[in-house]
Image (cartoon, coloured by chain):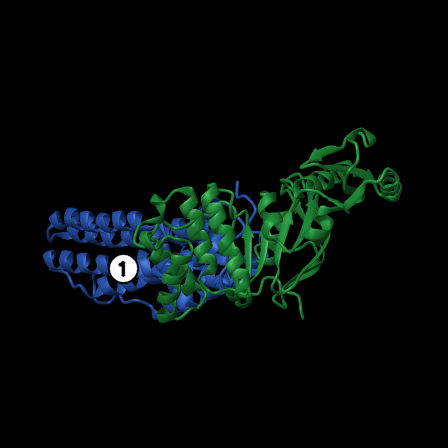
Amino acid sequence: MKPVALLALNFLRQHRWPVLILFAWIVLTALGAADFGRDRVAVDDAVFYVQQLVVYVCVFTAFLAAGAIHNERKSRRILLVLSKAISRGEYLLAVIVGSFAMAAAYALVFGLCGVWLTARAQLSSSGVWQMAVLIVAGALISAAVAVFFSTFLSPYLATALTLLLFAVPAAVHAQHHRGFVWLPGFPILVQVARFSFRPEWAVNWMAIVAAVLESIVFWGLAAAVFERRDIAVPVE
Amino acid sequence: MPDVLDYDRVTKDYVTLWSRQRVRALDNFSLSLERGEIFGFLGPNGAGKTTAIHLALGFMRMSSGSGRLLEKPFGEAKTRARVGFLPENVALYHRPANELLRFYGALNGIRPQRLRQRCREVLRQVELEGEADRNVAKFSRGMQQRIGLAQALINDPELLILDEPTSALDPGARVAMRELLLEANRAGKTIFLSSHLLSEVELICHRVAILVKGRVMKLGRTEELLVARDRYEIVARGVPPEMFPGSQMRDGRLVFTVPAGLQRDALQRIWAIGGEVLSVHPVRRSLEEVFLEMTNQGADA
């Protein structure tokens, strides 16, 4: 597993600047939301702040993960990496683990800002950390699906398809209250949409488990497809 | 002794996605590398050399045929821990040289203590020990090529696969690279060297294959390939130059060539006038001449 951890760290290092900008965005939006106060509208805005940051991380990880293979092939750096004792499956796992680690750091920054914000608004902060867990799970499944699509599509199409897969069922559910429980990421998004600072809101741990299992399935599918791809041909 | 690298009737077709146009890069290609040799892999651009290398390392899949790398089928990740690879136009992560080497070494599962020692050794080998802490992004192309070679050597591989290793090097660095490859070979490593620099190949390779349009046009020991059996060079003394048109005088000796089969007649003519025959041997060609002959034949075919 050490090579996977090394490649995951390398993935994070390659994307450190966009990740740091995203972290700055969390802090800045928290500072903006801090002025909302304690009335009814302020609570709604705080809820929106929390919800939008979960959606951002899913979009962001899909974007990063979908471009990983393409960028490495285009720069030809993938050749040296895969000339070592690394299987294609391990290589993809490293991209997913790197995205997961990025999301975990994001969730930590989000949690700290969220606790500070909810303390100012005199709201319960217990939901913030549960949302942090949803962030990590959402980013994980988002990265796994994006990596799967990117094994046979361009990074733009892979990102678009990943986001459509998440967004369309969520939109249909919001309109018609129809369930798509079997679709990847759907149970996570439903929980995010239902989020509130009321004590009755609690994370559904089955959705987290489902996201982890689905991520493993998508990684397996991605590895099977990527194993059959010629990686040394030009990507353009 | 089992072969280190073995291609058995390998064909590789590239198929374009939309037009379904098929380009054959390797055509029924067979080749075996013996343990401990330096093998020169030659061919014009587009001959299929890099494709053959990429197939061995599992970057691509064969359309048909089979291949074995260190006695395992192509594409097995664990086997690659025993191989060092330097691609053409090496692309490296922008990190200090020392850190980069540790990264690539760790990917091959080398333990940290051994890795530190190997980093020092290979940096010394490629004469970059003074640059260990400098970011490779700031290196010249030649230095990057040498760091590329260092990462190929980091795991002390049994087989070194080098795709145009001297293309970016100045003459001095080229000589150093040649010495380094010979030293690695003396240490028991097998070297598969794809190169356009025929003089380098001629100097260090035990065997050579010339690939044209995905097919091996010529394969053999370098010395044998360079010998033209169709012409003989005769060196004689006490013979007037006008007796053999096209001959040259060197240090009082007459040097000329005759087609194979006519050498006996030429010798008898020299002896008949009281001349002395100093040597008779097949004409030695340069690898460049052999290469051009093969590529022209391949183009005609």
Chain at tag 1: A
Judge by depth and name the residue closer to the eye, A73 or A92. Answer: A73
Chain B's shade in the image? green
Residue A97 shows in the view: no
Q: Which residue is located at x 34 percent, y 58 percent? A: B99
Residue B81 falls left or right of residue B14:
left
Q: Identify the amino acid type marked 1.
A: Ala
Residue B194 falls left or right of residue B209:
left
Chain A's shade in the image? blue
The residue carrying pointer 1 sits among few (fewer than 14), some (14 to 19) or many (20 or more) residues within 10 Å by Cα, namely some
In the image, is residue B203 above or below residue A139? above
Judge by depth and name the residue closer to the eye, B140 or A130. Answer: B140
Give coordinates of residue B121: x percent, y percent: 39, 62
Give coordinates of residue A34: x percent, y percent: 13, 50
Number of marks in the rendered image: 1
Residue B288 falls left or right of residue A29:
right
Judge by depth and name the residue closer to the eye, A58 or B222. Answer: B222
Residue at label 1?
A105
The quadrant where residue B120 appears = bottom left
In the image, is residue A131 above or below residue B54? below
Residue A53 shows in the view: yes
